[in-house]
Image (tube, rainbow, N blue to C red):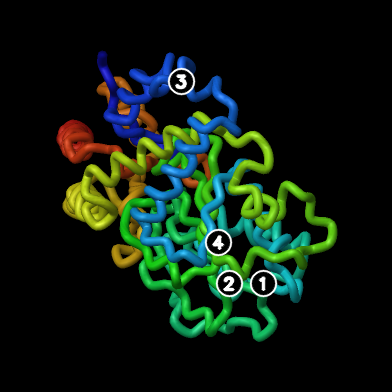
Amino acid sequence: MSRVYNFSAGPAVLPEEVLATARDEMLEYGSSGMSVMEMSHRSKDFTDILDCAEADLRELMDIPSNYKVLFLQGGGNTQFAMVPMNLMKNKVADYILTGQWSKKAAKEAEIYGKVNIIASSQDKTFSYIPDLSDLPVSEDADYVYICQNNTIYGTTIWNLPNTKGKDLVSDISSMFLSQPMDVKKYGILWGGVQKNVGPAGVTIVIIREDLIREDVLPFTPTMLKYKTHADHGSLYNTPPCYNIYICGLVFKWLKEMGGLAEMQKRNEKKASLLYKFLDDSRLFKGTVEKKDRSLMNVPFVTGNEELDKKFISQASEAGFKNLKGHRTVGGMRASIYNAMPYEGVEKLVEFMSDFEKENA
C-alpha cells in the first residue's frame, strides 16, 4: 500500500487507524451479520452507534447538558439558510465577513431579513481578522455570525467578538475538534465534517436548547427546523448512517490520542514547522498576517504564477497531493488537519526547501 500525503482542504485526510477499522468492519459490524451501510437507521445497532458518537463528542468538547447535538445533512450551504430561518425573530442579524463562506452566509441571510455587516476584512482580500473588540452590534439583532476558521484564506478568529449580549453563531467546519472550545460562549456551533472529522455528508450542529423554537419564520420547511431534528434525535429522516459511523470512529481515535488539548499541541507543532519555513524562505511567502494564522489551513505563494504551477505539479509527482490553492485566490494551500502526521509536514518542508534551492 502506498498512501500519499493528502493536503486537501476537504474532503480531507482521515486517520489511518480509523480507515483500518472501517475496512475490517466493512462486511460485518460486530455480530450484526451486515455492514453499517446496510443496516436500518432504526435498528439497535445503529442507535448504539449514534448514541455512542454523541456521547464521545460531548465528552471531547465538554458540551453542556443544555445543548443539543444534531447530526444533519446539507452542508454549510444549508446552514446558511437554517440559521436565519430558525433564529431571525426580529428579522435582523449581524455578520462579520472574514472570507468566502461568511460572505455567502450573509448573502443567503439577506433573503430572510436585514443583514448588517459589522466588520470585514475584504479590503485586503481577507488576509487578516478585523478588530472585533468593540463592534457596532445592532440593538435588535437576533444573533452575530462568524466563520471562525477560514479555509480558503488561512485565517482564524482567535479572540471571539464582543457580541454585547447577542447570541454568537459560528461556522467551525475547518477547525472542528482541532483544539478545545468553550461551547458556552456560543448559541450555535456548526460544522461540515468533511474537513477535520469525517467523510462528506454529515453536518453537526451544537445548539443551545432555548434557540430550538417553534416560532421560526413561517415558511420554514419541516426539514429545515432545528426542532424537527432535536425532537427526533437526528432520526426524523434516514441520516447518513455510514458517515456518522466513521465520525464516531474519529471521536474514539481523538480520545485515544489524548483529547483536544493534545490535538492542539500536535497541530501547533505542525503549523509552527511550516510557518517558520515560510517566514525564513527566500522563495515562498505566507499570505496571512501572523497574528491571525490558522493552525489548519496554510496558504502560500512564490509570487510567480508559473513557478506556483511548477511547484504544484512537481509536489504532486512526489506524493504531496492537493496543494493547489482555492480557485478564487490561486497559489498554494496546505491543509494540515488532525489526521495529517507531523512527518507529512516535515517531508513537505524538505521538498519545499529543495525546490527553493533549484528555483530561487
- Amino acid type at circle 2 is Val
At a point 34% along the width and 47% down the height, the residue shown is 300
User: The residue under label 3 is which amino acid type?
Assistant: Ser
* Residue 275 appearing in the image: no
Indicate the amino acid at tag 4: Ile
Query: Could you say whether the residue bearing mark 2 is in a helix, strand or loop?
Result: strand
- Say few, some or many: other residues with alpha carbon within 10 Å of mark 4 (under 14 / 14 to 19 / 20 or more): many
Q: Earlier in the sequence, mark 4 or mark 3?
A: 3
Residue 156 at what x, y percent from top left?
Answer: 39, 61
What residue sits right under mark 2 in the picture? 144
Q: Nearer the viewer, residue 212 or 13?
A: 212
Front-most of residues 164 and 205: 205
Rendered position, 185 above or below 148: below
| Residue occupying the point 37% across, 61% down | 62
Marks 1 and 2, the one that precedes in the sequence: 1
Residue that carries the numbered disc 3 in the rendered image = 32
Q: 10 Å neighbourhood of mark 2: few (<14), some, or many (≥20)?
A: many
Tally of numbered discs: 4
Discs 4, 3 touching: Cβ within 8 Å: no
